Image (cartoon, rainbow, N blue to C red):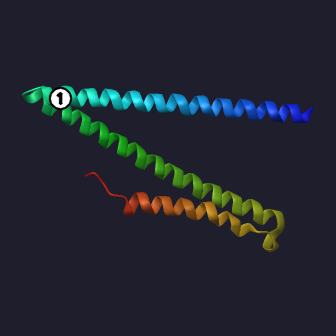
Amino acid sequence: MILLFVSILVVCVFTFLSIAVFTASRRKEREAYYKGESMRRIAETQGNAAASILDVMREEERQRERRRREGMKIGGLINIAVGVGLTIFLYSLGGKESPYLCGLIPGLIGVAMLVYVLKLAPTAE
């Protein structure tokens, strides 16, 4: 009975993953197509309209980069919080004999993410 449940679960998960990957790739393909069409039309346009459209596209790219950086900041903070929580939890289970320092792994990953975003990442400004 449990084997049947596990096999059905595996089939459902992989079916979902294949559909999700397919739809994501189709979306990216459509976005690339529309962006290419926009660039072609911009190249055909003359005057100030092309410059204003290019400014809008640059602003969209800056916003996309800003969202990515903010996502990395949040991810770093979450990793630090998970590391601190895991350290406290493991220490409370067994004191000095427990592997409580394993909580440093996600915490240090979070610190590395924050250091990269705040100090090392190239900025658009």
Residue 15: x %, y % from top left: 67, 30
| Left or right: where 63 falls relative to 110 | left
Q: Is residue 27 above or below residue 100?
A: above
Q: Is residue 116 above or below residue 6?
A: below
Residue named by callout 1: 42
Residue density around tag 1, few if under 14, some if 14–19, many if 20 or more, within 10 Å: some
Secondary structure type for disc 1:
helix
Q: Nearer the viewer, residue 3 or 105?
A: 3
Residue 82: x %, y % from top left: 64, 55
| Left or right: where 100 falls relative to 75 | right
| Left or right: where 13 falls relative to 66 | right
| Image point (35%, 32%), residue name | 32
Which residue extends farthest left?
47
Q: Quadrant of residue 80?
A: bottom right
| Image point (37%, 29%), residue name | 31
| Image point (37%, 58%), residue name | 121
Query: What is the quadrant of the N terminus in the image?
Result: top right
Q: Is residue 71 above or below residue 1?
A: below
Residue 46: x %, y % from top left: 8, 27
Q: How many marks?
A: 1
Q: Quadrant of residue 13?
A: top right
Which residue extends farthest right?
1
| Image point (54%, 30%), residue name | 22
- As shown in the figure, which amino acid type bears the numbered disc 1? Ile
Residue 28: x %, y % from top left: 43, 32
